[in-house]
Image: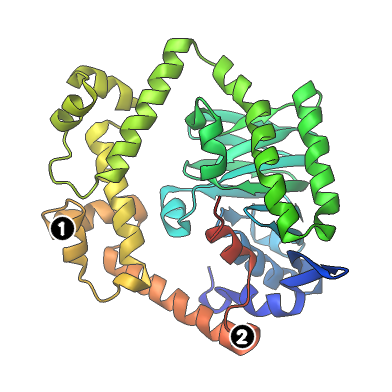
């Protein structure tokens, strides 16, 4: 990626970006607009597009020639705890890797209706195929790799804290597809279209009022399909695995976070724990990966720029800095110091763009997504 274009969309958003629409005396939902056709070239539009969507996905085109005919358009509304938008672009690859997950710092759910086009690929082991009219749901805490056709979709971003409590098996949603011809698919697609069509006249208070109903409808449409995919015992194992994973995430700094400790905490045998985490690369590997993701987040965070990398590694359970650096490079493709330098450069560049064109505190689509809360 060309560094000269990093966060370029921040300056361009000043020309096509965030606004507040008004409905009489009642301020309407904040609105973000990007149209690649008004940028000076298709290549520039592509780099702006990459930066805009980087909080969700890493994107790439099939070859260099495809850049010359690139196009994209986004119209997005901030409805309080929810975001809904229309997105249109050309064929491309979408990827969400462990590094993307760590860098973005978001774990929302994304629900997408495809009136035109679709995609095929893999959502952390699940084969996914979306046809025109279908609705998919993605978990941003999980990895993904897809190939999209030229498309237009309606994208709804829902904070995990709103949807997860309504589901028996929230880990089972990633990559699920509701066929557009199904009754539930028809119901949900019409609802999403209605919300998007009226979003421009909704106030922030209206958006907050829609939140519970929207989350309940999504859970009602996708939940039964997730539950029907496996027997009751498998669902219970999924719930138990989720509990263990949450416990691990809450205790990553504990040096006593071991297989024996978890076996005692959850009254499980070591063999049972091993079977549960085998698809995730083993329990020890899973703990190491979660600690590395936490280290990545803190090493690249401005609030921890004064702390040594060795100290941060030690806090999150790595006693040997050299071994930590090797593990970090294997996972993220760069050293901890390179990651910190890249993050620092990105912040400086973004601040220069913001101070030069947007002014302090101007909202952008990426900022909305990062700070979305239930």
Side of 352 where 31 appears, left or right: right
Q: Name the residue located 59 percent from the left edge and 48 percent from the top edge.
A: 94
Tell me which label, 1 or 2, sits earlier in the chain: 1
Disc 2 marks which residue? Answer: 359
Q: Quadrant of residue 41?
A: bottom right
Name the element at disc 1.
helix
Assess disc 1: are there few (<14), some (14-19) or many (≥20) residues with their C-alpha within 10 Å of its C-alpha. Answer: some
Give the answer, above or below, for where 184 lies relative to 11: above
30 shown above or below 227: below
Q: How is the image coloured?
A: rainbow
Q: Residue at x 56, y 47 (%)?
A: 159
- Observer-nearest of 45 and 267: 267
SS at mark 2?
loop
Q: Which circle marks residue 314 in the picture?
A: 1
Closer to us: 97 or 256: 256
Question: Can you give x and y, in whole percent of width and height, for residue 344 in the image?
Answer: 39, 76
Vertical placement of 130 versus 288: above or below?
above
Query: x, y (%) of residue 346?
Result: 46, 74
How many marks are shown on the rendered structure?
A: 2
The residues bearing labels 1 and 2 have C-alpha atoms spaced at a distance of 39 Å
Residue 234 falls in image quadrant: top left
Task: Tell me where residue 136 appears, x and y as whole percent.
Answer: 66, 35
Pick the front one: 83 or 6: 83
Q: Is residue 280 visible?
A: no
Is any part of residue 217 visible from this angle?
yes
Disc 1 vs disc 2: which is toward the camera? 2
Q: Are marks 1 and 2 in contact (CB under 8 Å)?
A: no
Which residue corresponds to the image point at 51% horizontal and 48% vertical from the top-left? 96
What residue lies at 48% left-to-right and 42% top-to-bottom?
A: 143
């Amino acid at each position: 990626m060309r560094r000269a274009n990093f966060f370029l969309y921040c300056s361009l958003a000043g020309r096509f970006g965030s606004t507040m629409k008004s409905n009489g005396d009642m301020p309407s939902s904040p609105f973000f607009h990007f149209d690649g056709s008004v940028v000076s070239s298709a290549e520039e539009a592509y780099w702006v597009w990459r930066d805009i969507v980087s909080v969700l996905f890493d994107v790439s085109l099939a070859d260099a020639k495809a850049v010359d005919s690139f196009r994209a358009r986004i119209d997005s509304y901030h409805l309080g705890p929810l975001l809904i938008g229309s997105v249109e672009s050309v064929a491309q690859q979408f990827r969400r890797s462990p590094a993307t997950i760590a860098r973005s710092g978001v774990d929302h759910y994304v629900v997408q209706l495809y009136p035109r086009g679709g995609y095929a690929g893999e959502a952390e082991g699940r084969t996914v195929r979306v046809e025109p009219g279908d609705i998919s749901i993605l978990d941003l805490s999980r990895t993904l790799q897809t190939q999209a056709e030229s498309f237009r979709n309606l994208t709804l971003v829902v904070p995990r804290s709103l949807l997860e409590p309504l589901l028996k098996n929230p880990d089972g949603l990633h990559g699920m597809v509701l066929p557009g011809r199904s009754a539930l698919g028809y119901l949900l697609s019409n609802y999403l279209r209605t919300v998007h069509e009226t979003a421009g006249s909704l106030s922030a208070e209206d958006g907050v009022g829609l939140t519970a109903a929207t989350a309940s409808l999504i859970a009602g449409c996708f939940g039964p399909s997730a539950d029907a995919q496996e027997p009751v015992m498998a669902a219970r194992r999924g719930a138990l695995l989720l509990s263990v994973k949450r416990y691990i995430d809450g205790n990553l700094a504990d040096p006593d976070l071991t297989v024996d400790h978890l076996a005692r905490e959850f009254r499980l045998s070591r063999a049972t724990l091993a079977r549960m985490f085998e698809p995730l690369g083993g329990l020890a590997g899973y703990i190491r990966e979660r600690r590395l993701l936490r280290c990545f987040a803190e090493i690249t965070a401005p609030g921890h720029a004064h702390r040594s990398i060795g100290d941060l590694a030690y806090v999150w359970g790595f006693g040997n800095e050299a071994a930590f650096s090797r593990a970090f490079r294997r996972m993220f493709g760069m050293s901890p110091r390179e990651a910190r330098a890249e993050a620092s450069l990105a912040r400086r560049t973004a601040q220069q763009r913001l101070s030069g064109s947007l002014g302090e505190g101007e909202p952008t689509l990426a900022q909305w997504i990062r700070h979305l809360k239930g």
